[in-house]
Image (cartoon, rainbow, N blue to C red):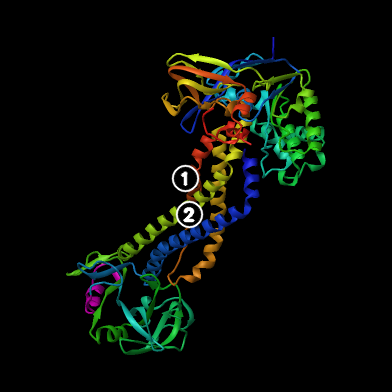
Amino acid sequence: MFSITLSDLLYRRRQFLIATLGAALVFAMTLLLAGLTAGFGVEITQTVGGFRADAWVVKAGSSGRVTSLTPMSDAAAALVARTPGVTGATPVVVIPQTASVDGALQQVNLVGAPVGSAPARQPLTDGHQVAGPGQAVVDTRLGVGVGAHVAVGGHPFVIVGTTSDRTLLGGIPNLYVGLRDAQVAAFEGARIISAVVVTGVPTRAPVGMTVLTGQQIDGASLDQMATAVSSIDNSKLFMWVIAAVIVASLVYVTALERTRDFAVLKALGASSGSLYAGLAFQAVLVALIAAAIATLLAQFMVGVFSQPIDFPTSAYIELPLSAVVVGLLSSLIALRRAVAADPAKAFAG
Amino acid sequence: MAELEVRDLTVEFDSGGYRVRPLDRLSLDAGGGELVVLLGPSGCGKTTLLSCLAGLLEPTDGTVRFQGIDVGGLSGAGLAEYRQRTVGVVFQAFNLLASLSARKNVMVPMTLAGVGRKEAGVRADALLERVALSERASHRPAQLSGGQQQRVAIARALVHDPPLVVADEPTAHLDHIQVEGILVLLRELAAPGRTVVVSTHDDRITHIADRVIELAPQFSDADRPDEEVRLADGAVLFEQGDRGDLVYEVVEGAIEVYRNRSDGSDEVLAEIRPGNYFGEIGPMLNLPRSASARARGAVVLTAMSIRSFRARFPATVKEARGPLG
């Protein structure tokens, strides 16, 4: 039966090709959405990891979301440094800001850390690390290179280096500056910090503060994106449904066109089950080919998105498995056609 | 003992809410090696009979036995096995799968029966050679003439060397040259060990048949005197599905023309009063009666032949009157 089905598929290759490409586009979108969701987590992990901290000391009651930590006095750094188990304490500022780039306003995440400190040093793609006031290193997603001028809160910076994979909040680039520069730009010079990142393992937190691990910061920051992730996941579900509708339409039209063939095949001894198996085979094959095309297509479509997209390995496993499910569900729509085929109808002239 | 035995075969089905009975208590026998021709006009039940022989249609009543197998008693795997191995079917419209080459079309029944690809290919090649189509084996149906398609269909019907071959109007779509080739082939197939049953409305095929079965009785067109018929109240003159050669004129009383609905009720179509006639369509077109007729009160009728009817009602013969006959 499968060889007969395969021949039919080749015979109707144009309509199968159209449906396959349609399903492939939808599958590619699904893959991209999966990448987008994963991207949120990856950018947080990369940025938080970039601070090279063993723990974060933040104001008690703070959510732990890296871009919205409750501000506190930078005197906290000295208190934290004296906490048993701490080998290094670095005050940092992390706060979303609007930057003026060649007169255009763009969102950035302003990250301030003492010049030369571990949190201030990011892997560079060009230029050098921040070495003094008025200098900044920025993620390449801001679209500016070394030597460009950027203003944050009216405070001018010159870009001395660029880095990559340092974004938050869905692809918003981080702008790394000196701690004092960050306080001037964001807090009109007030000596406020977002957190103290420490090396070593603090045995307790100073009064009014709490200790969080990097994973806790990651988790809390990802929670911030929960609504966006949920929306994307829902969109992904719709994409699967759309793909199923496309494949189902194809299989149903094919079944309609093959009503006479089904009657003849039954007259020649085919069972309803084998006819359905043939339809299911066609649907699954179309869905799997579409999934394979989608895998390639998605790589080319990444550039369309400004957000970081990271295709997790699980997406490549999930896609073909889901394609099989989509194919099988789609073929159910034609099940009745196969079962109801009356072999006596083969005699109709 | 006959290879093929059909006893009191009745098939009844619903058609647009009405009960239709294309076969009514039909019986026939055929021996091995015989070419049996079922002759009759469209609608006389030829295809319905073939469907029953092929195990594609379950009769309402009666039996079909082939080589001792009660075809109506088969189901599931047994029925599939019968369709695959015992009977080969040649359809009027060829019914080849458009997506497959001639060779693959011939291989289909073997594929369905689980025969290996190589073995099926060898068998298909041999059969295509037998029907003189080896050189067209790789062509799809759309690239073949009607006669060639029918030969492929015959080759397909023979793949399992079935002892029964049924062919439904196998020459209907063919020109006379193609007809000749197909008839010669069918005649050759009817050899010891194989019974071939062919339905047709073309009586030229009867000349090569071993047995001719007329499914629609031929009524004489010869003139015969009109007869008076008297019916008591409620007496049925004829029933829907009956065959008859007489037209009736109401002399006294009234006749009710009605149809049997699928739900068992009757639908009255007309009441025929004195001076009016009914029952002319069936005899004129050699079709079964499309409605029943019964007396309403005591009735006197004049029964007449078609020739007499034409003579008495020359103007009205050309009028189509609908289901009154």
Tell me the residue that label 2 is attached to. A243
Q: Is residue A270 visible?
A: no
Residue at the left extreme of this rendering: A207
Residue B170 vs residue A23: left or right?
A: right
Residue A263: % across, % down: 59, 35
Residue A171 vs residue B202: left or right?
A: left
- In the depicted structure, whether residue A106 falls above or below residue B127: below
Residue A6: % across, % down: 63, 45
In the image, B292 versus B191, the foreground residue is B292
Identify which amino acid the numbered label 2 is placed on.
Ala
Q: Is residue B312 visible?
A: yes
Residue at the top extreme of this rendering: B1
- In the depicted structure, whether residue B313 falls above or below residue B163: below
Which quarter of the figure is the N terminus of chain A placed in?
A: top right
Tell me the residue that label 1 is attached to. A329
Whole-number angstrom distance, CA of label 1 to CA of label 2:
11 Å
Q: Range of the magenta residues? A: A71-87
Identify which amino acid the numbered label 1 is placed on.
Leu
Residue B36: % across, % down: 72, 21
Which quarter of the figure is the C terminus of chain A placed in?
A: top right
Residue A264: % across, % down: 62, 35
Label 2 marks a residue whose chain is A
